[in-house]
Image (spheres, rainbow, N blue to C red):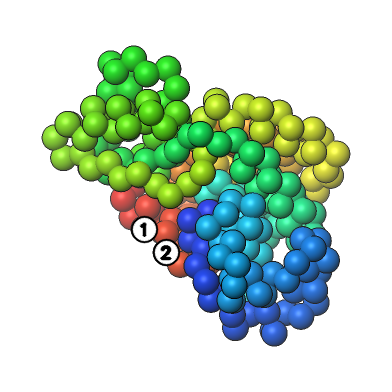
Amino acid sequence: MRCLLFPGQGVQKRGMGSDLFARYPEATALADDVLGYSIEELCARDPLRRLRDTRFAQPAVFFVNALLAREKPQPDFVAGHSLGEYNALVAAGVLTLADGLALVARRAGLMAEVTGGGMSAVQGVPAAFVRRALTETGLPNVFLANLNADTQTTIAGDRAELAVAGKAIAALPGARVVPLNVSGPFHTPLMAPAAARLRGVLAEQAFAPAAVPVVSSVTGELFDPADGADLLARQLAEPVEWVRVVHTLRALGVTEFDEVNGRTVTALVTRIH
């Protein structure tokens, strides 16, 4: 069985989707209407260099992901990494394209309001080692944010504490710590204010039954649309459980992973055993 995967923020680059917008004029016009600006100009040319800004990067990635998904055969399962989960829900018919884009734009705005934090990728050591190092350093405002692969995680939190944590983790044999170019401490309890506000927005959203099973990046289990508002709100302040997602998909019989918009998350799949 085959699973279609959707990456999240971080894959954006100028020129992405350039060949897609003319092929899907109705969807592109819809996006312009929802967002209030030209999605084609943002993605293809980015004259104002907005793709580095969370508020614009997330809608851009989401929309290009959505168009690329239309050119893929129907999958047996779908899953998305963080922002990509909204694409999975659209692909599964749980959300419409318009509703998904509107939610992503609101999500991006709320996330961008939480500043003063950062994120760092940690490679070469298991998550348990990273978690132990964080505990031993006694830093209350640094957390595991993404459990991406067996020996690849992301930590996030207060910038000053994050620097201290990075040095402690880098001292572990085989560990490499790389700061990420993001504006906030995503997927940590420091995002709780944004998560609470997003929960209010999501409470007004209708979630349809899934035509294709979706695996939640929060729980690593099948996404229940009845709990959609709760799961998507929790996503902002809880870790991305990508290792659990992949284990669940494999247990459900998935043997083929196909990704839109690059190979970021597929590369992680190959490093999960």
Residue 74 at x, y percent in the picture: 63, 68
Contact between marks 1 and 2 (CB within 8 A): the answer is yes
Q: In this orientation, does residue 273 appear? A: no
User: Which residue carries the number 1 mark?
Assistant: 267
Residue 156, visible in the rendered structure: yes
Residue 64: image location, x then y, percent: 61, 68
Residue 37 in picture, x, y percent from top left: 75, 66
Residue 243, disc: none
Distance CA(mark 1)–CA(mark 2) = 6 Å
Q: Quadrant of residue 29?
A: bottom right
Is disc 2 placed on a helix, strand or loop? loop
Is 20 on the left-hand or right-hand side of 200?
A: left
The residue identified by callout 2 is 263
Up the image or down, 50 lies above or below 107; here it is: below
Snapshot quadrant of residue 161: top left
Name the kind of residue labelled 1 in the image.
Ala
Three-letter code for the amino acid on which mark 2 is drawn: Arg
Q: Dot 2 surroundings within 10 Å: few (below 14), some, or many (20 or more)?
A: some
